Image (cartoon, grey):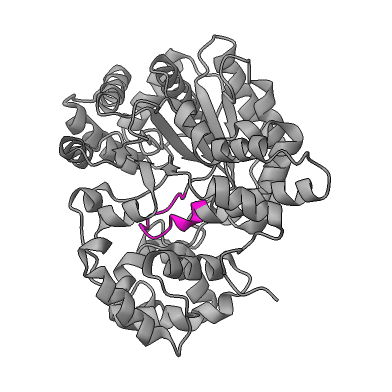
Amino acid sequence: MKTFLDEDFLLNNKTSKRLYNEHAAKMPVIDYHCHLPQKQIAEDICFKNITQAWLNGDHYKWRAMRINGIDEKFITGNASDEEKFLKWAETVPYTLRNPLYHWTHLELQRYFGIKKILNGESAKEIYDECNEKLQSKDYRVKNLLRKMNVRLVCTTDDPSDNLEYHQQLKKENFEVSILPAFRPDAAMNVDNTTNFNKYLTRLGSAADIMIDSFDDYISALKSRHDFFAANGCSVSDHGLEQLYADECTEQEAKIIFDKIRSGKNLELAEAKKFKSAMLKTFAEWDHEKNWVQQFHLGALRNNNSRMLQTLGPDTGWDSIGDFSQGKAVSKFLDSLDKNNKLAKTIIYNLNPADNELMAAMIGNFNDGSVAGKVQWGSAWWFLDQKDGMTKQLNALSNMGLLSRFVGMLTDSRSFLSFPRHEYFRRILCNLFGEEIENGELPNDIEWVGKIIEDISFNNAKNYFNWQHFAL
């Protein structure tokens, strides 16, 4: 019987172990999509305790605690940090077969060298040990990134952000490149007229433009897009239920914008038209600058209206949505491709029912100009676990070229989540190792090892044009 989380974790044969240890394990990490707070990196903070480093903002853990019957006081409420940790520790034994069980213990091992199982009995000892280590300079935020061999991180930033912390980090010559990503969700979310008009005030202030007309609005956004590019940005990202690809003329967009600015709510068809126009505009700007555009599709957000009102968004009340994706994705990509304005694109789905759809769709718009120009992104959110990753890798292998895949990302707000890259790499090596030992693939360790190194690191470095960084 194998030992839990030993050096051969998820590696089930000699070839898998060799592929991981000789090829995957040595590769640095590029995390091209996450939600790390850049302010904490720039200030190189020292977390006061493991709760603040590990539980604050982690809605994965919060959901598990709620399912386990833990009162909200110990999750997002006014309980002490120690009480919150102890309640999480009591929950951990009940997360067996949930990826949280793996991630929890992998993170304790990789960051703190703790191999004990976390539960109610071990909680206090582990809490104290982690807290003691967190007070050391070795556990300041920048060293947490260094510890995991992270070379580049892309944060997620609104167009109105001033990017002051990115600028500070660049001046400091921090060897881990921290780059912004342009995320204009709020800049095109016209579902709530009041909120959108408030946002326009913030956007106008950032761009130093009074936004009275559609032309002002476009000028302000273009100014911010250019500002992001001047500050090292080469990636955009959109979090959407689905892509929007309705026809919308410039005159129609102006009429819709004027209606919003007058304080009137839009009809559903008008909102879809406006969003379609803006998505296409952003995509064309991305193409002009040779950026990579990303689309995270399919989240049904804020399902619990009572808790949304109490705690706000991004607190653990989102789910997988069953939106129709295929036709809109096809129409959107085609509208850009036929005018030779399709940037390099990564599409992520949250509903696993769309796996094969996405794996097949990307092949329609890979034109040979760039290896893997249109990518199907890594298993995301509810799917970034062993089963979800395996299904994504298999579907991509069956319908595309896994060898050109740009690999894993954390999509996390936590500095302790980088072992997810290791988790992914172990699963990847095991897939190849099993098929080599089954005689389904040739026993060419040199070539397969190169493919694994590429998926782990090299493909992302080349795809995003980051060769000039010290990677």
Residue 273 in the image: above or below residue 75: above
Q: Is residue 9 visible?
A: yes
Q: Nearer the viewer, residue 108 or 302?
A: 108
Look at the picture and state if 393 lies above or below 101: above
Query: x%, y% of residue 73?
Result: 36, 79
Can residue 70 be seen in this snapshot? no
Residue at image position (25%, 33%) is 203
Instruction: Give the side of residue 464 with respect to residue 299, left or right.
Output: left
Residue 293, given in percent of the width and then of the height, sits at 47, 29
Residue drawn at point x = 59 percent, y = 47 percent: 379
Residue 316 shown in magenta? no
Tell me: 471 left or right of 452. Answer: left
Residue placed most toward the observer, 396 or 288: 396
Which percent across, then down, holds residue 455? 57, 38
Residue 458 place in picture, x, y as percent: 50, 33
Tell me what residue is drawn at x 45 percent, y 31 percent: 461
- Assess whether residue 413 is covered by the magenta stretch: yes
Magenta span: helix, strand or loop, mainly?
loop
**Vertical placement of residue 8 versus 263, above or below:** below
Q: Which residues are magenta?
A: 410-421
